[in-house]
Amino acid sequence: MAPDPSPDPPPAARLLAIDIGNTSIAIGVYGGEQLEATFRVASDRENLPDEYAMLLAGLLRGRGIEPEDVGFAILSSTVPPLTSVFGEVARRCFGVEALVVGPGVRTGVRVRYDNPREVGPDRILHAVAALHRYNPPLVVVDFGTALVFDAISREGDYLGGAIAPGIGPASEGLFARAAMLSRVSIERPPSVVGRNTIHSVQAGLYYGYAEMVRGMVRRLREELGEDATVIGTGGYASIVEQEAGCFDAIEEHLNLEGLRLVFEANRPEVGAAGRSGAP
């Protein structure tokens, strides 16, 4: 059982936002609405809470932030085993009870999926942040472990979208199964006609994904409206945009901003998410 919360932390207390993905974990520290620091660490299901706590405390101190400066925490996760791990990290390292994004947590977004519980929290967070910054209809393209296209209607409803293998996992699958192909960096090659193996693989990945993104965005706009704003986020968004040329904006920390907004929307009910009596 979590310890009883102590009086509310001072207004200057920072918010720790944690977005746990299948490949990496995005971490941000907010002072009010200002994103003061960001980190990204590998999603390792074998790490224990103490290991992640030591890692996170060291990263924060490297930016001049002490663990006691954190007064709140919120996390979302698509990796269930790590959800409880980081809940424990929040208690041990920061003495706070993290608010976990899931059923019962207000987001302000109506979900029109056939089964809303099937929608990953990361997709809803992107919708929350995108709607805060842009007028719908919206298309969010997330370059993560999966390449995810999310559609938000003119009324601001989350409709669904499309999911394809991400560039990283797709390339790893290719290298793992093709013995004569070596790993290459994913970047624009000199030509679509590769004159060596490295450039050939780069051409297939770079131009192939750029064309898929461009085609999917076109189709989504046909359904949502040609005036739909298209937002790219995730590690390869800026690289692919150089060729795809279909994004209206690149938002590097859309997931973290979504976490901050969801925390604020639920703040009256998150007494248990504030600083507790944990050491």
Image (cartoon, helix red, strand yellow):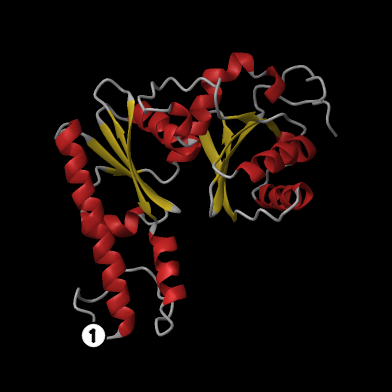
Q: Residue at x 54, y 42 (%)?
A: 78
Q: In this rendering, would 81 be left or right of 168? A: right
Task: Give the image quarter of residue 183.
Answer: bottom left
Residue 219 locus on image (x, y percent): 18, 42
Q: In this rendering, would 43 be left or right of 128? A: right
Q: Residue at x 74, y 26 (%)?
A: 275
Task: Give the image quarter of residue 92.
Answer: top right
Q: How many marks?
A: 1
**Which residue ends up furthest to the top in the rendered image?**
268
Residue 127 seen by the camera: yes
- Relative to 124, is 93 above or below? below
Crowding near pointer 1: few (<14 within 10 Å), some, many (20+)?
Answer: few
Query: Given the image, on which type of amino acid does mark 1 rest?
Result: Arg
Residue 188 seen by the camera: no
Badge 1 is on which residue? 195
Q: In this rendering, would 240 be left or right of 126? A: left
Q: In this rendering, would 259 be left or right of 86? A: left
**Image quadrant containing the C terminus:** top right
Q: Residue at x 58, y 45 (%)?
A: 79
Q: Which element carries disc 1, helix, strand or loop?
A: loop
Q: Name the foreground residue: 246 vs 182.
A: 182
Q: Residue at x 40, y 67 (%)?
A: 171
Residue 128 locus on image (x, y percent): 41, 29
**Which residue ends up furthest to the right in the rendered image?**
279
Residue 223 locus on image (x, y percent): 18, 34
**Image quadrant containing the N terminus:** top right
